[in-house]
């Protein structure tokens, strides 16, 4: 695995009107963001106020501990067929096993959301990893890839490949996702900071066929409790799950959302972070790098 020695600079674009940013997709100049403690999809233009679209009915408690218990934990957001988006729950608790397919109107005036169950799939995966905690998703070749975050004592990062055609059929039918969708599961070591392992928090497909991950070194005892973040990194995987390079991100932000889009031979990478503090607004950053080497530009 190559370690890029060059310093990376992040350009701060704006602070978002949410705190626990967890998934990021960009389309048509808009940044779509889910937060793991919200019931809405946020959409941010380049300038101006955001649009908000309810993912499900209801209101979460304001008190932090109660909110954490009841949140659906939409950790992953990825683009899907026909211009749709998929928001997926982490599966780390029984009330976190829902997915939502989202169709946003072309004029951004509204969105149609349909919920489906991930419980059968999560039950199958829970038997293969120490503590289930799916925090990222991306369409990668013929698969929809889910990323298991290996935070907590004894946990491990894993890449789960689902059959894309089977997922498409389930999404169209709004059917529950089952174990039949699983093609394989591979554990992935992303390194560490001072003995605290990097654990994957999101993923985005690269234009050249690679997969870009964000990973955070969070010193937490399990998948439920938050801990001090020692730093984050960008990591490139090549098929089927080869770690090619890792690039440390500046500061101690816990970056939980990533998006990559072509910029000539380079890629522009957008990032959002979660401070684990509801009083701190999540920042949106951008940087440019060489996807083959991880070298900043």
Image (cartoon, grey):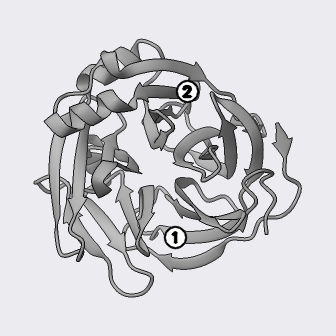
Which image quadrant is residue 46 in?
Answer: bottom left
Which image quadrant is residue 279 in?
Answer: bottom left
Q: Is residue 11 above or below residue 102?
A: below
Image quadrant in which the C terminus is located: bottom right
Check residue 158 in the rendering and tell me which mark sits there, or answer none. 2
x, y percent for residue 47: 42, 87
Q: Is residue 97 above or below residue 41?
A: above
Residue at the left extreme? 57
Residue located at (71% from left, 58% from top): 249
Image side of residue 78 versus residue 38, left or right? right
Residue located at (41% from left, 67% from top): 27
Q: Which residue is mark 1?
A: 283
Residue at the top extreme? 127
* Badge count: 2
Q: Secondary structure at mark 1?
A: strand
Tell me how far mark 1 sits from mark 2, CA to CA: 27 Å
Residue located at (72% from left, 54% from top): 291
Sort mark 1 into few (<14), some (14-19) or many (20+) by Cα contacts within 10 Å.
many
Could you say which is closer to the camera, residue 181 or residue 245?
Answer: 181
Q: Is the C-beta separation of discs 1 and 2 under 8 Å?
A: no
Residue located at (20% from left, 68% from top): 105
x, y percent for residue 91: 34, 31
Image side of residue 139 versus residue 193, left or right? left
Q: Nearer the viewer, mark 1 or mark 2?
A: 2
Q: Secondary structure at mark 2?
A: strand
Sequence-wise, the earlier of marks 1 and 2 is: 2
x, y percent for residue 231: 68, 52
x, y percent for residue 23: 43, 54
* Residue 97 in view: no
Which image quadrant is residue 21 in?
Answer: bottom left
């Amino acid at each position: 695995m190559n370690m890029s020695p060059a310093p990376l600079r992040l350009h701060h674009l704006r602070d978002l009107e949410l705190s626990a940013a967890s998934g990021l997709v960009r389309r048509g100049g808009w940044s779509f963001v889910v937060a793991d403690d919200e019931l809405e999809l946020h959409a941010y233009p380049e300038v101006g106020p955001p649009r908000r679209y309810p993912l499900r009915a209801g209101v979460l408690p304001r008190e932090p501990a109660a909110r954490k218990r009841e949140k659906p934990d939409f950790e992953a957001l990825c683009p899907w067929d026909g211009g749709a988006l998929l928001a997926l729950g982490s599966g780390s608790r029984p009330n976190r096993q829902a997915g939502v397919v989202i169709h946003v109107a072309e004029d951004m005036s509204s969105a149609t959301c349909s919920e489906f169950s991930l419980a059968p799939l999560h039950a199958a995966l829970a038997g293969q990893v120490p503590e289930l905690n799916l925090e990222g998703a991306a369409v990668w070749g013929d698969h929809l890839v889910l990323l298991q975050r290996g935070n907590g004592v004894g946990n491990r990062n894993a890449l789960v490949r689902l059959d894309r055609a089977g997922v498409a059929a389930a999404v169209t039918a709004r059917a529950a996702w089952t174990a039949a969708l699983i093609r394989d599961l591979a554990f992935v070591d992303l390194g560490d900071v001072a003995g605290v392992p990097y654990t994957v928090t999101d993923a985005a497909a690269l234009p050249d066929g690679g997969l870009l991950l964000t990973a955070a070194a969070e010193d937490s005892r399990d998948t439920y409790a938050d801990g001090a973040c020692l730093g984050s990194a960008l990591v490139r995987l090549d098929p089927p799950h080869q770690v090619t390079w890792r690039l440390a991100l500046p500061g101690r932000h816990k970056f939980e959302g990533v998006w990559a889009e072509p910029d000539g031979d380079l890629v522009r990478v957008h990032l959002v972070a979660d401070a684990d503090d509801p009083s701190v607004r999540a920042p949106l950053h951008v940087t440019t790098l060489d996807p083959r080497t991880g070298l900043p530009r």
